Image (cartoon, coloured by chain):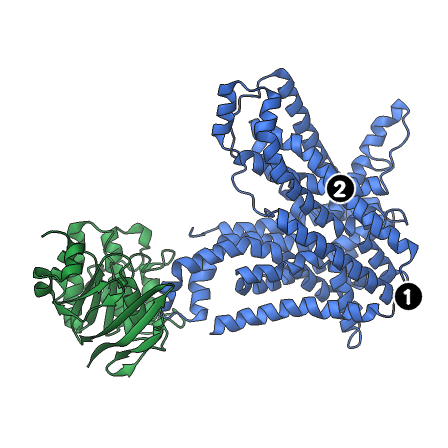
Amino acid sequence: MAPRAVAIIAALTVAGLVIGPVTAVILRAEAFSGFRPADWQALRFTLVQATLSALLSVLFAIPVARALARRQFIGRGLLVALLGAPFILPVIVAVLGLLAVFGQSGLLNRALEPLGLPDLQIYGLQGVLLAHVFFNLPLATRLILQGWLAVPAEQFRLVATLGMGRGAMWRAIEYPMLKRIVPGAFAVIFVICLSSFAVALTLGGGPRATTLELAIYQSMRFDFDLARAAVLGLVQLGLALTAGLIALKVTAMPVAAQGLDRHVPRWDRNSLGAKLWDLVWIVLAAAFLLTPLAMVTFNGLAGITTLGAPVWQAAGHSILVALGSTALCLLWALPLATRWGEWLGLAGIALSPLVLGIGLFLIVRPFANPFELALYVTATVNAFVSLPFVLRILRPEAESIRADYARLRDAMGLSGWAWLRWILLPRLKRPLGFAAGLTAALSMGDLGVIALFADPDRATLPLKVYQLMGAYRMDQAAGGALLLLILSLGLFWMFDRGGRVGSST
Amino acid sequence: MALQLDQIEARAGAFVLSADLTVPTGQRVAVIGASGSGKSTLLDVVAGFRRPTSGAVRWHGQDISNLSPGQRPVSILFQDTNLFPHLTIGENLALALNPATGRLRTGDGDRIEASLTRVGLRGFADRKLSAMSGGQQSRAALARVLLQNRPVLLLDEPFAALGPALKTEMLDLVAEVAATEALTVLLVTHDPQDARRFASQTIVVEEGQATPPRHTEDLLNDPPEGLRAYLGER
């Protein structure tokens, strides 16, 4: 019965991590006087930006996905693989890249200058939308591409035989497919953007562009108004829960997309117009995604050699936090890789990191200085946030291993330890490596709860880069961002590779 | 001194199996019947994968109904998946010897090699299943059963995937091993030839009813009505 005991302990700690902080927040919120106009505005802005972000991402994703579905070209595989990258890309790195392209003195403004056009302003709603589309356009594209590739080839063949025109084909195949996929894609992105913190922190701000999460942070950091932070946290929690449940109804979130390198032969692709149309969208999407990353790399190369000791120290903190949160997340995930475990893990999506952070702050404060525990809290919260993704990756594999070998295990009377050591872990090696890589990279790049707690001695690398940005030391910030990019992708690569080497399946 | 199914009733959904019978120690007994008749349920009850809703499984008079499969004096060969494919044969057999840790103690290496020699697989300890033929995989599974060293052996159509000649060869090998180790064996099969060749006694399972074992030749030469229908005209 030992394995069951382990599963129960894991479930209790996860449940405790939900119930404890939420209770603390609720208790604290009682001392609250009332919603201020600024709070209403934060609520409104949160909803407006999430709606627009989801709308724009999906809208642009449709032509990009269609182009990818019906064209074959050199680099297509690379581009499709790249669509998965934003998931592990640190927000602060993307923001620096977007600033380098769309910012005050970015590429675009410099190109427009000779034309005598007014400067583009990135800060505010447009900046938040830009960053959200940068992160979620790839996700939406992958979801819709999956839908397109799932259309049976016979249908396109039939369309070709019948000589159907564009309009007829749209009605017969494309519209029904999009109607099935698009609402789910919209809902997922809407939920993700609801809890947007780091983007709003760096590109939003001011009373007109403050999300609820950012308002929570500000009432903690600037006013130290815990009651207000708690109430905002409850509103955020209610919002995310409602939207999350709706999203769960309409969609299934893909983490590891498979079969996207398939190519469906179609007969509507040979007109010059169609070719040009697809070309434009592919070039635009690739440029939109790649230019900021290229700029981060280019700008960072100069700065990375001159980074000061505090930046390196922050990088060290970040690596430790990433490794700690990976270990914790896998310790939770292994015994919880079951159906009910996955339901429990979904709390990691619904519960925003900042709400969790506030709750933990309130719990810890009577006993210790929360600021001293900043790194531990960050690692714990990061592990919790990654849990649903990790469970989504591990559960199908773990269940098929159990289905295949549970009878043999019982017939041989294997102990829980022998099962773990000799059967489960070796057979799970590949998805474990992938899941560990995701967790480590997500944690490495996280700029969330650490911002609530941090003091200068306990900064992580993303926070350090943010502080350098705020101090207008852009060279150092760019160098730090490049270092962060290298570390995040490097950690992911190492773990993922580790899972593949000598893997038996 | 025997394996006893004492007024057993076991439910699997709407299906009910009932059995009240005794298998003498050291006997090789075939279990024959149509698919869906309850043969596998019967085996599951003996192995411990299914708890009977009433009645008791006894071994040498002792009630073993509440023991888990690993604790019973029983080893089993399944239709497939009798060894872990990602481990070598040696690692599989080490797990059979030490199911708590899977590590080798002193002398275990020799025991593993001896059991492999016994089934005609000397020197195969470092191989994986994927590098072996179907017949060799069956032999390796038999080595696992030998090392588990349990007095009762259950065979759930374990050689169904082998060709006729190989299957006969394996049954003969199991019969020989069972004779020298004085094992009590239940062989589930739907082939009367297997029963004739392997088992002096046979249990018939029909629509959830398991009869006590009867002499195989007598039974097959003069089958009762239900079994006759199953066997077809002869």
What is the x, y in percent for residue B231? 15, 55
Mark closer to the observer (2, 1): 1
Disc 1 marks a residue whose amino acid type is Ser
The disc numbered 2 marks a residue on which chain? A
User: Mark 1 highlights which residue?
Assistant: A33
| Chain painted in green in the figure | B
Q: Colour of chain A?
A: blue
Residue A97 in sight here: no
The disc numbered 1 marks a residue on which chain? A
Q: Secondary structure at mark 1?
A: loop
User: Mark 2 highlights which residue?
Assistant: A53
Q: Secondary structure at mark 2?
A: helix
Disc 2 marks a residue whose amino acid type is Ser
Q: Outermost residue, top direction?
A: A272
Q: Outermost residue, front direction?
A: B225
Nearer to the camera, B13 or B194: B13
Rate crowding at label 2 as few (under 14), some (14 to 19) or many (20 or more) other CA atoms within 10 Å: many
Q: Residue at x 67, y 35 (%)?
A: A61
Q: Outermost residue, bottom direction?
A: B61
